[in-house]
Amino acid sequence: MNPLKLSNLLAVVFDWAGTVIDFGSHAPMGAFVTLFAQEGIDISIAEARGPMGLPKWHHIDALARLPRIAAAWRARHGREVCASDIDRLYDIFTPLNAASVAGHAELVPGAAATVAALRAAGLKIGSTTGYNRPIAAVLAPLAAAQGFEPDNLVCADDLPESRPAPYGMYRCFLDLGVWPAHAVIKVDDTVPGLLEGANAGCWTVGVTASGNEMGLTWTEWTALDAADRAARSAQAAARLEDARPDYRIDTVADLLPIIADIDRRLQRGERPGNGPKTTA
């Protein structure tokens, strides 16, 4: 691997599940299904994945307000879901998800080497997540033991308003001591997470193969033939298009050429969002 030589970029901010850890973003899924099952309501994995990237309170709220689930809630409880219900469900969900992340804490292949190369090029490494602080407290040491230990960690409950608002990125700017925003890249596998970066004025890179929109394990992904991989990556990329990412990649193992290209574009005076959409 040739070392990166950069002159315009300062930092890369990564999402966690589905981007650098937990290939396919599986840890929250069982927790959401179990949570609603305890209320007497069956939800599917596909439904559980729909709002992924939002802070977990808002994710639960979004699920509860889906027409089918809302109807099941009314049938079960005799009334509409309300904020106090979501508060109660969130309190139940946090330990469920904290328990599940330990079994889905393996780094995405290539993540540690990519981060090491970015650090060697002089970049700072930030991170934001839709997980709250108690869940991240379980996950962070497991990631660190495998070589992913970012310079900061911004959790959804650290902020007055989380994704898709840009406040998580603003906290990264402060924590890392970096600016302007166009010298920072956000890498994420969800629309809310990508919008968090775009709304802050950063470059955004959408991750498809390892992310929530694909929902496959590493073993399932590598078992696909080239045509299936390409087709499924295209489908996942289309679902990320609401965030209009500047680039799309399969996994963070594909990130380094993108970093070099963005640095060259900055040298030419380009800024996020004003160039062609590119897939590596």
Image: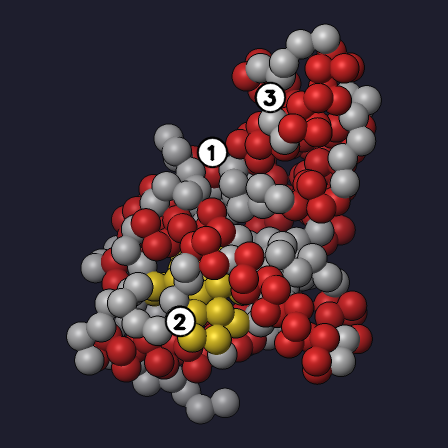
* Disc 2, SS: loop
> In x, y percent, where is residue 101?
69, 47
Characterize the local packing of mark 3: few (<14), some (14-19) or many (20 or more) Cα atoms within 10 angstroms.
Answer: some
- Residue 276 position by quadrant: bottom left
In the rendered structure, the answer to whether residue 146 lies left or right of residue 275 reads right
N-terminal-most mark, 1 or 3:
3
Mark 2–mark 3 CB contact (< 8 Å): no
Q: Residue at x 60, y 62 (%)?
A: 236
Report the front residue among 57 and 136: 57
Report the front residue among 183 and 41: 41
- Residue 150 in sight from this viewpoint: no
Q: Is residue 206 above or below residue 103?
A: below
Q: Residue at x 39, y 49 (%)?
A: 196
Q: Residue at x 41, y 43 (%)?
A: 164
* Disc 3, SS: helix
N-terminal-most mark, 2 or 1:
1
The residue wearing badge 3 is 86
| Tag 1: amino acid | Asp
Q: Is residue 157 above or below residue 187?
A: above
Characterize the local packing of mark 1: few (<14), some (14-19) or many (20 or more) Cα atoms within 10 angstroms.
Answer: some
Can you tell which of label 1 and label 3 is closer to the viewer?
3
Label placed on residue 277: 2
Label placed on residue 198: none
- Residue 259 in sight from this viewpoint: yes
* Disc 1, SS: helix
| Tag 3: amino acid | Ile
> In x, y percent, where is residue 69?
70, 28
| Mark 1 and mark 3: Cα distance apart in space | 15 Å
| Tag 2: amino acid | Lys
Q: Is residue 113 above or below residue 205?
A: below
The residue wearing badge 1 is 157
| Mark 2 and mark 3: Cα distance apart in space | 38 Å
